Each structure stands twice: as C-alpha cells, then as structure tokens.
Amino acid sequence: MKPTEKQIQEIAENLDCGMRCFYNLKTGEIKTILNFDSGIGVDEEIWEEESKEIDKNWDDYFEFEGFESYESFKIMEDFAEIVEDTKLQNKLKNALNRPKPFRNFKWQIDNSGDYRQQWFDFKKMRYIQWIKEQIDLNKKVFNE
C-alpha cells in the first residue's frame, strides 16, 4: 500500500511545518508528530500517545524525510532563478548571499505581493516531488 495523492499533499504540508510524518504500511494511516530534535521547547506529553504507537509498531511505519537545510536553500535558489520580476529576482539572490539567508529570503517573499503565493506553490510542488521520490526509492517497502 502506498499513499494517495491527497495523503502525499498532507505529508508535504506537515513536513514543511517541521513535523515528522509516518505512513502505516498496513493501514495506510498517516501519523504526524512534532520533531523533538528541532530544539523547540515543547511539551512532549501531547505527542506521547502517537510516539508510543509508532515505537511499538516501528516495522509497520515508513518515515518520510523532510529537507535538510542545504536542500531548502537550493529550493530558494531555484525559485529565485525563475522569478520573472528582475528587481525581485535580484533582491532574492542578494538575500541568499547575505548572513541569515533564510530570514532575509522570507522577508523578501513576505513583501513581494503575488510572488509570495507563487513561492508557497513552488515549495509545495518540490516537497511533493521529494515524497514521490522517496516512495519510488523504497518500492519494496510499499509493496510495488
């Protein structure tokens, strides 16, 4: 069993939010928990039941991986390359070449009007592609 298109989109959205996403290979159910390694101070008790379920039945789950920071940086670079507005394209490229590139890029995008939604759509598309690649690379796990 492998995830549906709707589930792939759900996984993409959760990974983009910094969550950990697990797919139950037997039931097709998605379990999402907070990434406790992210350094964010949070009450882990909220996620305890889900975590225990996953740990108890580890072999039944496939964990989808999110992007590493260098991969996220590459996605921002790729987006900057396709922006048609030359002024904005230069601002995005400059933001990526300064200290704190993620924060600077975000600020430019948040103040870019219609390009903000184009960025979200672009990033979601890349997440969906990444999830499908993980499924393809693990065909045996998904019984294909």
Image (cartoon, helix red, strand yellow):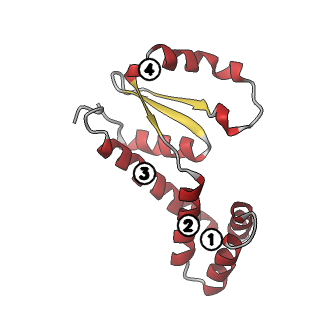
Residue at mark 4 = 58
Q: Mark 2 and mark 1 in contact? Answer it, CB < 8 Å.
A: yes
Give the residue number, with chain letter if any, for mark 3. Answer: 130
**Which quadrant of the rendered structure holds the C terminus?**
top left
Q: Which residue position holds label 1?
A: 114
- For the point 57% across and 58% down, the residue is 70
- The foreground one among 73 and 119 is 73
Amino acid type of the residue tagged 4 in the rendering: Trp
Select label 4 or label 3 by which is in front. Answer: 4
**Where's residue 19, x and y in %?**
59, 37
Determine crowd level at label 3: few under 14, some 14-19, many 20+ residues with C-alpha closer than 10 A: some
**4 vs 2, front mark:** 4
**Is residue 3 toward the left or the right of residue 125 in the image?**
left
Q: Using the image, determine if residue 134 lies above or below residue 99.
A: above
Q: What element carries label 2?
A: helix
Q: Determine crowd level at label 4: few under 14, some 14-19, many 20+ residues with C-alpha closer than 10 A.
A: some
